[in-house]
Amino acid sequence: MNCREFESNIQSFITGEFDERKYDSFMEHYNNCSECREELEILYLVHNTINSDLSDEFSFNLRDRLKIHMKNMEDMVYRHYKYNFLKNFVIILAETVLSGAGITFILRLLNIIS
Ligand SMILES: [Zn+2]
């Protein structure tokens, strides 16, 4: 991911409408590009300033909040991966069981015929 792509994804990252498949390259750029990191932090601050009802929250350290936000995004992405993994596992298991049943059925059929 380059700076342009990163910038175009900042807004969705902050609002949580982020395409999870982009997460790894997004974070890679975030960790390697100080300019984009700064931009994300600024936009994150702006976003929270606009959307925050409690003025007390401003005393809360921005970097900590951002860290929490990134952890949440990471959890979301991780949960998604885990879900996909489990889903695929169940499908493979079901296919194995079904194909096993299919083979058994064919074998039985052959026994009946012979
Ligand atoms: Zn950059």
Image (cartoon, rainbow, N blue to C red):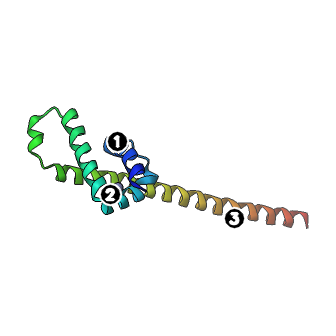
Residue under numbered circle 3: 100
Which residue is disc 1 drawn over?
Answer: 11
Q: How many marks?
A: 3
Spot occupied by residue 58 in the image (x, y as percentages of width and height): 11, 41
Judging from the image, what secondary structure is the residue with disc 2 in?
A: helix
Alpha carbon distance from label 1 to label 2: 14 Å
> In the orientation shown, which residue stands out farthest toward the right?
114
Cα distance between the residues tagged 3 and 1: 49 Å
Above or below, 87 relative to 9: below
Q: Earlier in the sequence, mark 1 or mark 2?
A: 1
C-beta proximity under 8 Å, tags 3 and 2: no
Label number found at residue 30 = 2
In the rendered structure, which amino acid carries the disc numbered 1? Gln
Q: Position of residue 36 (x, y in %)?
A: 31, 53
**Which badge, 3 or 2, comes first in the chain's sequence?**
2
Residue at point 26% right, 43% down? 43
Closer to the observer: label 3 or label 1?
1
* Callout 3 touching callout 1 (CB < 8 Å): no
Closest to the observer, 109 or 15: 15
Q: Where 58 falls versus 22 (above or below)?
A: above
- The answer to whether marks 1 and 2 mark residues whose Cβ atoms lie closer than 8 Å is no
For the residue pair 93 and 49, the one nearer the viewer reads as: 49
Q: Which amino acid type is marked by label 3? A: Gly
Ligand 1 sits in quadrant: bottom left
